[in-house]
Image (cartoon, coloured by chain):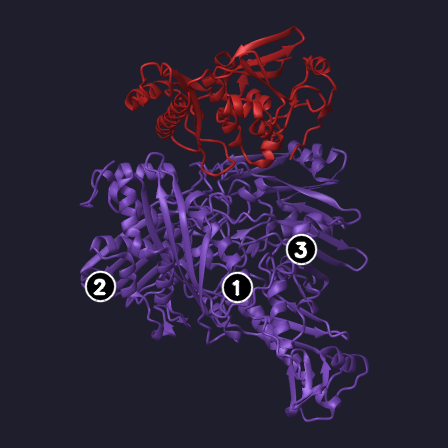
Chain colours: A red, B purple
Amino acid sequence: MITQEIEYHAPPSLVDVIALLDDEDRHVELLAGGMSLVPTMTLGLAHPEVLISLKRVPDLSYTRLFGDDLCIGAATTHAEITASAEVLDNVPVLAECASLIGDVQIRNRGTLGGSLAHADPAANYPPLALALGASMVIRSAAGERVVRAADFFEGVMQTAVAHGDVLTEVRIPVPESGEGAAYREFVRVEGNFALVNACAVVSSINWAGRVALGGIASVPVSVGLAGLVDAGILDTHGLDAAVDEMTLGAFADINGSVEYKRSLARTFARRAVDAAIGRAARTKDEQ
Amino acid sequence: MGPQAKPSLIGARVQRTEDPRFLRGDTRYVGDLQLPGMASVAFLRSSTAHGRILSIEGIPEALALAGVHRVMTGDELAERCAPIVVPWETFLEYHACEQPPIAIDTVRFVGEILAAVVADDRYVAEDALELLYADIDPLPAVTDPLAAMEPGAPQLHANIPRNTNYRGHFANPAIERVIEGATHAVSMRVRMNRHTALPMEGLAVLAFYDPGTENLTLWSSTQMPHMVRSKLAEWLDYPENRIRVIAPDVGGGFGQKANVQPEELILAALSLDLRRPLKWVEDRQESLVSSYQAKEEVVDCTLAFDGSGKITGLKARFIGDGGAYSAYPWSPSAEPLMASATVQGPYVVPVADTEGVCVHTSKATCSVYRGVGQPAGTYAMEHTLDMAAHAMGIDPAELRRRNMIGADAFPYTTFLGGVYDSGQPIATMELALETIGYGAFRAEQAAQREAGRFIGIGQGSMMELTTFGYNEMKNIGWGQRVSAYETAQVTVDPSGGVTLRAGTQNHGQGHETTYAQLAASVLGCELDRVTVETGDTSASPYGWGTWGSRSAVAGGGAILHACEHVRDKAKRVAAHLLEASVQDIDYEAGVAFVRGTPDRALTLADIAQAAIVRGDVPDEEDPTLDEIHTYKPPSPYAQATHVAIVEVDIETGEVELLRYVVAEDCGQMINPTIVEGQIHGGVAQGIGGVLYEHLRYDDDGQFLTGSLMDYLVPTANEVPPIEIKHLVTRSPVSKGGIKGMGEGGAVAPLAAIANAVADALVPVCGWQPIDTLPITPEYVLRHIEANATDASDPNKEIS
């Protein structure tokens, strides 16, 4: 249970949120869906003194196309993403990924921005953000900046969202024609975090692409597929070697040894890439 | 026109009458109860596995916090409450330890209570816990039961050398000769995982000492309210007739709540001290770290066979890891004892030598959990049988067929002298095999293997000791503490309504429905005219609660008898009212009438009005329709075969259940829907035990699985549809032909699923025993890696 006294705010605007974040003395946390922060608090692992809820801030929950990007408000829930026509039509792999998060209750409350800012190493979105080249829009008193996924994840539960920042939007480039993408994960019991997850994107035009892995290291890791896919055929040994190289930082925990996690990484990288190739090939056939 | 004979409700698929209130949330659990002036209790629990308690610091600071009323340590509690101890005079070797409900001097597991805090609410109480600090001088911990038995191991209790609290050897000196002379003999060792019942509702206690009446009332989420009352009286030295224990709605127990809990004693003592109501509701972390755990064993099993594949001998040893203390009334020895006593299963075993050993370790105390030892015993027999089948080149089902007890051999005396009352194990197994399509499976398996998929089939056949009857309990010696009779009181009110009271304690089994079915069948009334009251020591006759698959036989038998007495009394009163001879009275469908003249019929309500309100009864009768009957139940055996088909992903090691079939025979069913619900729940818990659930400690005794993110429990997504078939062999020894069946669902899944996994892996690494549970994906990969090189299967092909 949560034992400490907490000061709670639910300001009506982003400006007010940012003003409240300007508190050097106390531990301040932003509260979105609460699906990670609140359990962490009940387990006594986080002790914020001030909670700022985003629930009354308008215009943080949306999915819309802007230019070449699919733009998603940070407070959009996993359930909304799963059901969004813009997502399903343009970046269906995001809906696939969101639909596998937790359980119905968690998907109804948990948000895209909350999950990315929390940056659990085993969360669903980080490898997807990395593979698809997403960008994160961050607001602070100093203004707005855009951080690419490759620069966003800094460590276990550490991101480019710094003191005084609010993550407001995620931008995902809409895949070009001929691209296929897939998300695969290994969970033991439905609703739990993945031991390892993978997101791959492959182009059937030039067979270039990228596969990213989560759950294996403190931050998501990825590797380009150039030279590993030829005419829709994956060089599995080549990919295994590439995955082995990028999973040298794997850590053991109660879910498995380093050796086992690295073997899962190889398997799920292959499965994600194979699925992405299949989808890319179908996209090609349709044209 | 006579009364229409109604079909008996015994055996009918009646919908559970208690479900509407559960589904609507109109239930009342201990957590829902509020009393004026009620305060909350929270516990300081040890984060050290083993050590000397030097002091509890911070008590003045905690007491200074607004809303904190009391901090109680072990020394203070000792002035009010004796330690928990489980005395047992037995022909077997046994040593009882003492457990102060709050630790004194020494702490022996992570999660043990060091102090109790009373405060206005749980928030304040937990704030106070943050101010307390236990200064503990650590001692070496011992977490492995085999290591704990070694000389020089840290000794946890001064009176228990080598930490060995129980050793029961059912010796047969002929066994070594039988094994030496066998045509085939196979042996295996398996480490069974420690897991836990995890009821949806954890423990919860509300203690209320009323200074006016000097009555102590304890609401507790328990399976055994009368026993709790008796032990409160004894250990608190308080008059038992001034104590009332009430178990309101209870959200599951599975054996974990069939023990006296330290928290019950602490809250009662504190309430007596503070003279106000006090509540504690266990949270999920406490439920995992400190509530009674179960089932950790190291199992060795050897089976010997003659040239025709008949079993000639069985040797088995079960070493139970009992954890730190001994839970009343079972002691942790229940697990290895039951395994060693039931390992024979449904097979003819000419010579058996079995042993159970129980060892204290620096981990939470183990007690009883659904099946108690029978899953381990069944695993030992069934997995070793599969090992033998592969070694001898005999189909596993055929090997069982050759060794199962024939239906004509019942009643059958086991190697221990117990009696299997009835059954038809071979027909049950054949029904399960036919249902799953065993004959066609091997071709399907080969075709799938061609397609790169690895599927396997496995079975687990069992005899389920149910009810733990009056004589059985005496024989085991448990009868010294739990004599296990059952009493029912059946009261007809002036309107003809029927109230049943029994000493069993419904905590999810559907007794409100099934007991009413029994009464309505005997008394011929409508189901909704029957009310069932259990779980309140002031309302129910003294009884032994619900555990050990006992309520249908023990409680049900007592109810059937008492209802028959009421029916007989109603006939006598009716004879008096109708001026006829009792011999001429028929009682059908709830009305009594003179045989041949059904138009002069009296309903149960008519008879009740006459007897209870007008006193219009024969002179020698009391003007009541109220009967009480005490039943000393037998121990009928149910039996079942479970068959699982699994697919193993040999890249990840993941095991997926594709199909699960149960063919079972629990005698006369009261309500097949409830029987099936019990099987569903049991199988789900068995799946959890064999594939997912594992309470883990590191070598220092630190607890590693304190949340449901780390302690994996199967969800509806991991449990396949369970296909159930029934056979009915009525018990010749129990009232109504009923057998218990509450635990059986959880007994066989471990064996069936492990056998299926081993079968699926034959093409990868030959048949090798699954020697560590749970079967995690990583275990599967290591198992393949360890055995792939020396696989003996000639058909071996590595993909």
Q: Residues within 10 Å of mark 1 (few under 14, many from 20)?
A: some
| Quarter containing the C terminus of chain A | top left
- Residue A94 vs B435, above or below: the answer is above
Report the label total.
3
Q: Is the C-beta separation of discs 1 and 3 under 8 Å?
A: no
Q: Point out residue B213 in the picture as x, y percentages from the top left corner.
A: 79, 60
Residue A40 x, y percent position in the rendering:
59, 29
Task: Please state which amino acid type lies under the numbered disc 2.
Answer: Val
- Which residue lies under the disc numbered 1? B672
The quadrant of the image that shows the N terminus of chain A is top right
Q: Is residue B437 above or below residue A34?
A: below
Mark 2: secondary structure: helix
User: Can the viewer see residue B95 in this picture?
Assistant: no
Q: Chain of mark 3?
A: B
Q: In 3D space, how far apart are the residues under numbered discs 1 and 2 (Cα atoms)?
A: 44 Å
* Mark carried by residue B20: 3
Give the amino acid at mark 1: Pro
Position of B170 compared to B47: left or right?
A: left
At label 3, counting other C-alpha atoms closer than 10 Å, the crowd grade (few under 14, some 14-19, many 20 or more) is: few
Residue at the front extreme, as displayed: A287
CB under 8 Å between discs 1 and 2: no
- What type is the residue that disc 3 sits on? Pro
Q: Which mark is residue B448?
A: none
Q: Nearer the viewer, mark 1 or mark 2?
A: 1
Residue at mark 1 to residue at mark 3: CA–CA distance: 19 Å
Nearest-to-viewer mark from 3 and 2: 3
Is B18 left or right of B399, judged from the image as shown?
Answer: right
The residue where tag 2 is placed is: B178
